Image: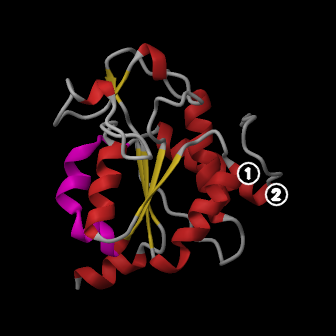
Amino acid sequence: MLTYTRVKAVMKPYQLSGLSFLVHMYENGMSAMLGDEMGLGKTLQTLSLFQYLEEHGNSAKQGEELRPYLVVCPLSVLSSWVAEARKFTPELRVLRYHGPVSERQRLKKVAMGQEDWYGNQLERSKSARGRRPVVSKTNMESTATNVPFHLMITTYETFQAEQSWFKTAFVWKYVVLDEGHKIKVSAL
């Protein structure tokens, strides 16, 4: 039986079954695909998985790399993902990674812990330039404000434009492709 306490939604039995499937696949090191019809709560199931992993996953140790979640989705649902993440899993800090090049450069600095949301350079960034963010004693808790984000949400187009950064900036804990069939079409 799955137990999680910090998801702000009441899930239907088929959604709990989908969440159980995702957890099982994750724990066995396998990829998974949710193929439910539109409107049945795939986003909620995915966000619930992230919250479950935060609550039941291995606790971060001092000096360990930050391992965030990544969602790559169409632009048409980017705002919905952000809104639902903030609504259903408010303890997970969300970073909406999208915009013109100058905005993405700023967001990279925020993501890497070099700047705060207002563009102020952070003290710890001076000694950590070019390195991945690390979980320290002060930011191990999922509610800590020192963790720049837990979940990054971006579009396919932004991911393609910044793919070298996405591939090297973090060791992603979990990557979700919303409407992943687009990957197959673009690969042809």
Magenta stretch, overall SS: helix
- SS at mark 2? loop
Please tell me whether residue 133 belongs to the stretch shown in magenta. Answer: no
Q: Quadrant of residue 3?
A: top right
Asked if residue 17 can be seen in this view, the reply is no
| Count of marks overlaid on the render | 2
Asked if residue 124 can be seen in this view, the reply is yes
Disc 1 to disc 2, C-alpha distance: 6 Å
Q: Is residue 185 left or right of residue 26?
A: left
Query: Start and end of the magenta stretch?
Result: 157-172
Q: Amino acid at mark 1?
A: Leu
- Residue at 38%, 37% in the rendered image: 67
Display coloring: secondary structure
Q: Are marks 1 and 2 in contact (CB under 8 Å)?
A: yes
Residue at the disc numbered 1: 16
Q: Amino acid at mark 2?
A: Lys
- SS at mark 1? helix
Residue in front for this viewpoint, 31 or 135: 135
- Residue 126 place in picture, x, y as percent: 21, 27
- Residue 138 place in picture, x, y as percent: 47, 17
Q: Quadrant of residue 91?
A: top right
Residue in front for this viewpoint, 70 or 11: 70
Residue at the disc numbered 2: 12
Q: Is residue 97 above or below residue 99?
A: above
